[in-house]
């Protein structure tokens, strides 16, 4: 399925791709294959930015790799978040969130209550040029 391109020494493993243009951003949904031909999804957010240092435009990209075994929980989580944004109603906890809350790695051992701790940085959300 995958082939090697000697021109740029990159593994060509892209099977299917669809770009979604949304305002100043473009999202790419790319189906790719591992060396063992297992399919996975990459979701890339691309934004055009201007560099004051060199006076040129560049594309800032953020990428998520999503594997088959995580599709169901990812879909449940994103659907719950979208439901909340659209309606303001907190959905009944999906199985994805319930599993995360019960995962000992995400429970604060110093607290009597469960807390969810995720290593996520949203620094890019603070930009004023959107």
Image: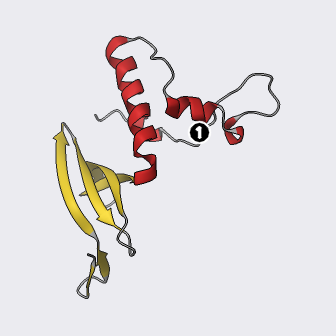
Residue at left offset 59%, top offset 35%: 100
Q: Residues within 10 Å of mark 1 (few under 14, many from 20)?
A: few
Q: How is the image coloured?
A: secondary structure
- Which corner quadrant holds the C terminus? top left
Residue at left offset 31%, top offset 17%: 86
On the image, the x and y values in percent for residue 37 come to: 35, 71
For mark 1, what is the residue?
118
Left-right relation of 81 to 1: right
The residue lying toward the viewer, choosing from 72 and 129, is 72
- Which corner quadrant holds the N terminus? bottom left
The residue lying toward the viewer, choosing from 64 and 71, is 71
The residue lying toward the viewer, choosing from 80 and 22, is 80
Image: 66 above or below 10: above
Left-right relation of 9 to 125: left
On the image, the x and y values in percent for residue 125 come to: 41, 35
On the image, the x and y values in percent for residue 9 come to: 31, 84
Snapshot quadrant of residue 54: bottom left
Image: 110 above or below 87: below
Image: 89 above or below 28: above
Residue at left offset 46%, top offset 14%: 90
Snapshot quadrant of residue 16: bottom left
Residue at left offset 71%, top offset 26%: 114
Question: Residue most toward the bottom?
Answer: 6
Image: 6 above or below 97: below
Question: Residue most toward the right?
Answer: 110
Q: For residue 67, say whether it is visible.
A: no
Q: For residue 23, say whether it is visible.
A: yes
On the image, the x and y values in percent for residue 78 come to: 39, 32
Q: How many marks?
A: 1
Snapshot quadrant of residue 129: top left
Q: Secondary structure at mark 1?
A: loop
């Amino acid at each position: 399925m995958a082939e090697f391109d000697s021109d740029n020494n990159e593994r060509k493993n892209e099977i299917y791709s669809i770009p979604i243009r949304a305002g100043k951003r473009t999202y790419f949904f790319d189906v790719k294959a591992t060396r063992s031909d297992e399919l996975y999804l990459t979701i890339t957010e691309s934004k055009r930015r201007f560099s004051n240092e060199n006076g040129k435009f560049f594309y800032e990209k953020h990428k998520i790799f999503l594997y088959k075994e995580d599709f169901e929980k990812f879909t449940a989580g994103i659907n719950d978040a979208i439901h909340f944004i659209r309606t303001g109603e907190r959905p009944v906890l999906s199985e994805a969130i319930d599993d995360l809350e019960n995962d000992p790695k995400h429970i604060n051992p110093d607290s009597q209550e469960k807390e969810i701790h995720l290593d996520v940085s949203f620094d890019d959300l603070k930009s004023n040029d959107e």
